[in-house]
Image: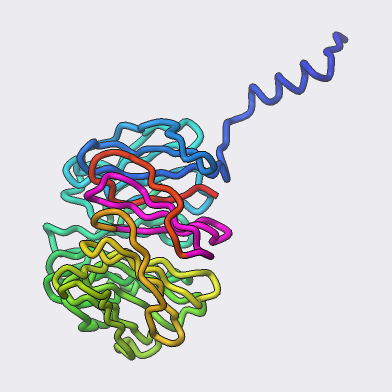
Amino acid sequence: MKLFPLSLLSFSLLASSPAFAKNTGYLFVSSEDDHIVTVLDGKTFEKIKDIKTSKRPRHLQFNPDKTLLYAACGEGESIDIIDVAKLEVTDKIADIEDPEAFDISPDNKTLYISLEDDGALGIIDLTSKKMTKTVEVGEEPEGVLASPDGKTVYVTSEVANTVHVIDTASGEAKAAIVVGERPRRFALSPDGKELWVTSELDASASIIDVASNTVKDKLTFAPEGFRKEDITPVGISMTKDGKTAFVTIGRANRVAVVDVAARKVETYILVGERAWNATLNQDESLLFVANGLSDDVSIVKVDDRKVTKSVPVGRVPYMVVVDD
């Protein structure tokens, strides 16, 4: 029997194994006008690569194990699927008219997506990559959030100023909750009791009691020196302990830092122009903010509540996610 050196055998085993990327620390930023997802090093923030996508990528989301990154491409009428190890688009879900925001079920079997032109929630089987059902909701649906137990999906309607509550077992709407004007995005409290929804044209966030499907409170944003129409909240990210929420307030070029229990804005952080969406890294030491009109990502040190760096990316960045 022929013997091989241990080092050669180890190399052979590694070479024949599939490549997996996990916890790379990379930032992924969608840019609407350049039709790319920019990849940044999570430590140096230098550009690693621009991944070419279908037209107008916006919403980004990883699958549960972060091996795949899904990008909703509105004008490309597809959801492009990026292999995180290869840093390239390797598959897509095609023929989706104007896909908006989406969420993936906890069991990684279903993708729920807002279909703006159809006024519907689309339900896609991730194995077959086919739309299995649509559920009628209010006009111009936007934000989508699947509950941790997979039993409920929440959808905002920008025109109806409503949050629709969809039962996933029946595929039927079980409640419609009126909120502020032009609701956009969600954050669910870690204990699952409160659903926060931003309202872009109301300068507010509504706080929904999940058990009763009613609005229990409302938080208004009012940074000094701005008219109400320039305070346009969209993105929201909440800490894992549920104590703090970060809300991007759009044309006011700021992120509101909110004490969740007190329902009070602690401070406003000046970031780039037209702050769209924001996400925290795993240890919640940094907040990354995509700025749609200054074509950059603001990196905020959470403890100091200050921007430490602004990183240029593609034109009209919309969302940033981090693989850590």
The residue at 34%/40% (across/down) is 312
The residue at 45%/43% (across/down) is 68
Q: Is residue 128 visible?
A: no
Q: Is residue 201 left or right of residue 73?
A: left
Residue 92, by quadrant, is: top left
Percent x, y of residue 116: 16, 59
Q: Is residue 39 visible?
A: yes
Q: Quadrant of the N terminus?
A: top right
The residue at 24%/62% (across/down) is 250
Q: Is residue 273 above or below residue 228?
A: above
Percent x, y of residue 205: 29, 78
Q: Is residue 214 above or below residue 195?
A: below
The residue at 36%/38% (across/down) is 38
Q: Is residue 208 above or below residue 108?
A: below
Residue 27, by quadrant, is: top left
Percent x, y of residue 22: 57, 43
Viewer-closest of 226 and 121: 226
Q: Which region shows up in magenta?
A: 276-304
Viewer-closest of 215 and 199: 199
Q: Is residue 314 above or below residue 270?
A: above
Residue 129: in magenta span: no
Q: Residue furthest front?
A: 225
Residue 297: in magenta span: yes
